[in-house]
Image (spheres, rainbow, N blue to C red):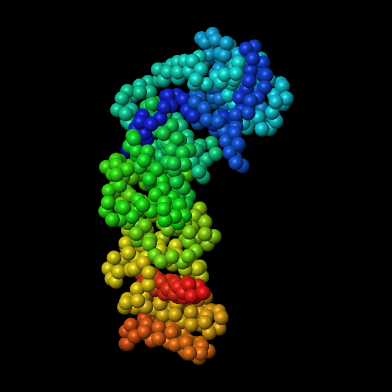
Amino acid sequence: MIVSALVKRYEDTLDVPVGWQKREVSYALDIGEDGRLLGVVALETQDGKKRVKRKMLLPKEPSGRTSGIKAAFLCDNGSYLLGLDSKRGTVKFAAARELHTKVLENMNTPAANAVRAFFAEGAPSNIAQFIDVETAAKATFVFQVDGRFFDAADDTARRAWDEWYAMENDAAQFTLCLVTGKQDTPEAIHGTVNLRGGQTSGSRLISANAESFTSYGKTAKDRAADVGKFAAFAYVTALSALLKDQKHRQFIGGDTLVFWAEKGGETEEAAFSNLMDPPKTDEDSVLVDIMSRIASGSRVNEYEFERMFYLLCISPNAGRISVRFFYVGAFGEIIRNIGLHYKRLEIVSDRRTPFRFLPLWLILSETTVKNSASDASPLLGGQLLHCILTDASYPFTLYHAILTRIRAGANINQAKAAVIKAVLTRNFEKGEEITVALNEQSTNKPYVLGRLFSALERLQEKANGSSTIRSRYFTSACANPGSVFPTLLKLSVHHAAKLDNDIFFEKLKGELLSRLDDEIPFPATLSLDDQGRFILGYYHQTQSFFTKKDKKEEVKNDER
């Protein structure tokens, strides 16, 4: 299903002919009609601090080119086209000469004659006059004859390669393609794509590189599957294009998500990209408008909610690409589920997090020691995204990772509190409703205990100018309140004595204690979900103190 969806993507949107591909090129070898090297033309452009290579439609790069020698037609690196390889330069140049001579054998045009003459002359000895030799050995080149590139735009080059590619296919035995259902030449070695974190030589979605992956009497020496050359070319081309396009790709920890809509769904694709990677807080942003209209049940006329949407989450592996999940659904259903996710994450701001809608990378970074999404558990990103898209329960590993970071002393910020709220709301639906901000009427014991801890911490801070109970007692209070709170209440008496005529904390402490069970006010232990409610109570109460402080400052400023 994945391959067939990618083949359809190729047929609907891509204008790359079979046997061709868009390749990134750094330089052009300017040659005369007699084959002599006249110069080297730089094709890269400067985009800020980044050098951008030119994308050109050129013959497909040969598959399986790792340690073996396989020349590419019309576009290759300096080790093949210039012989710049200290160990195998002569052999590589000879392979390139043989290929170009055969493909252009029946072509009698000035450009074709110039390329044949270039190889007949041997590797050019004057390359150092035009470019640094070390740079040239690794760079990618194309040919330029009489000021024109010898690529897909040239009729001679296109006709020569199409005939050669078709001749190679006709020489093989036809079979029924498992993807298209049509007779086609089976592809023995499927093409590679450049996947973040994958092999430098490229990663394959389909391959058989060990006996353990074989079945039905076939071995690793046989073709991976009965997939025709057209289907194999089409799905690799489509996947490569999606991976290179930032509008169709998102990085989620160590995973990569590619997404696309049915033909004509560019508007839906742009909306999904914004939903998955929301910008920083902006009340006037398009995203806020979309989310508010979806939440109210209004239909967004700009989008076709019934349009099918495809999401493929993949990650690199030593052998083939690992597929985390592949999901196909109506666009409206997908964004509805994303809207529900953001609704669960909604929580009172700590005025430090610049995002109104927390992006996935920020959530994953909160589970790590160095606050880096790339350090998150390898499976967590894909699991979390799949749960969001399907409105399933959140992975418990996410909840446990957040609790672990808090127990280790990490700051309880908006992102961590939002994740806890979302998990408790979706995974533990029973019990008292969890609110966005402080719920002063709550009688949930863990929530009230969290509020009480925040009040005692604030009391110590007002009395001494600083507080230490957060670092010393929070972990124990969250898991085993019965062993900690009696001590904290005794300490609070001494802290309150240092404050003159300030009865606010005493009233708050008394009110919170009155909401606890008289027989067992402080349980010996709290379950994992109750620990989350304790943390939310603490966070809500702490933010309430800061909110009241901000309001008092606003009143003073207005009086002035």
Which sits in the foreground, 61 or 443?
443
Tell whether 86 sits left or right of 405. Answer: right
> Most extreme residue toward the front, as rendered?
560
Image vertical order of residue 55 relative to residue 277, above or below: above
**Residue 359 horizontal/vertical position (percent):** 43, 54
Q: In this view of the protein, can residue 33 be seen by the observer?
A: yes
**Residue 412 horizontal/vertical position (percent):** 47, 68
Which sits in the foreground, 513 or 326?
513
| Image-quadrant location for residue 189 | top left
Image vertical order of residue 499 relative to residue 320, above or below: below
Image vertical order of residue 521 relative to residue 534, above or below: below
**Residue 352 horizontal/vertical position (percent):** 49, 64
Q: Residue at x 52, y 80 (%)?
A: 461
Picture quarter with the N terminus: top left
Which sits in the foreground, 92 or 3?
3
Q: Residue at x 60, y 29 (%)?
A: 43
Query: Total marks drawn?
Result: 0
| Image-quadrant location for residue 210 | top left
Q: In this view of the protein, can residue 203 be seen by the observer?
A: no
Q: Residue at x 45, y 35 (%)?
A: 241
Tell whether 88 sits left or right of 304. Answer: right
Q: Residue at x 40, y 77 (%)?
A: 451
